[in-house]
Structures are given as structure tokens and as C-alpha cells.
Amino acid sequence: MQAVRIEQMVSEDGRLTISGLPYKRGERVEIIVLPHVEKSESPQPALTVGKLRASGLVGLWEGRNDIEDSAVYARRLRQEAQRRDLDYDSAGH
């Protein structure tokens, strides 16, 4: 299936006229109408190592007395979150 993309302005409420399609009389087509979304002129810049370091996320848990090993702590948080998801799903939600 070949898609044809045409942008058209609605000139009258609820009415759209499309011409110049590459199809012949009697051919069946499917029409999907979507509102046009303006593309952002400036895409979000990539996160660089420098920006990540400056963000405050790196070293976030530093100096906490209740966390001896951050990798172990993070692993435990992930496991608890997974268990909550399973508990939530088994409750019929």
C-alpha cells in the first residue's frame, strides 16, 4: 500500500476538498484526516555529560548515612518497585 500525504486547509467548517490524487475512478481508498501539528523549531538539545554532571543527579545520594552502597540501594528500590507493580496487577487493577 502506498500512502499519499497532502496538507490541505479547511476552508469551510466540516468540509474538505482534495484534488490531484493519483487514483482512478472506481478505485477504493481509505481516508484518515489528522490535524496538522506544528513542529517545534528548536528540538530539545541532547543531554551531554557536562550537563548531566551539572544537573545535580550525579552524586545525589552522596553523604547519606542510610545508604552504604548506592548500587545495592538502587537495586533494592527497583525490586521493591517491581513487586509493587505485581501486587497492583494481582489486585485486579
Image (tube, rainbow, N blue to C red):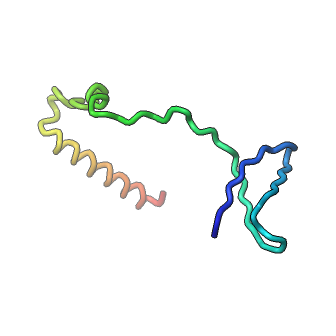
Along the line of sight, which residue is nearer the eye, 65 or 37? 37
* Residue 37 occupies quadrant: top right
Q: Residue shown at 31%/34% (left/top)? A: 48
Residue at far bottom of view: 26
Q: Is residue 5 left or right of residue 18?
A: left
- Residue 3 in the image: above or below residue 77: below
* Residue 12 occupies quadrant: top right
Quadrant containing the N terminus in the rendered view: bottom right
Q: Residue shown at 80%/70% (left/top)? A: 24
- Where residue 87 appears, as percent x and y from the top left, is 37, 56
- Residue 63 in the image: above or below residue 10: above
Q: In this view, does 17 lie to the left or right of 87?
A: right
So how many labels did they put on this image? 0
- Where residue 43 appears, as percent x and y from the top left, is 49, 35
Q: Residue shown at 84%/71% (left/top)? A: 25
Q: Residue shown at 41%/55% (left/top)? A: 88
Q: In this view, does 85 lie to the left or right of 57?
A: right
Along the line of sight, which residue is nearer the eye, 42 or 35? 42
- Residue 11 in the image: above or below residue 20: above
- Where residue 91 appears, as percent x and y from the top left, is 43, 58
Residue at far left of view: 68
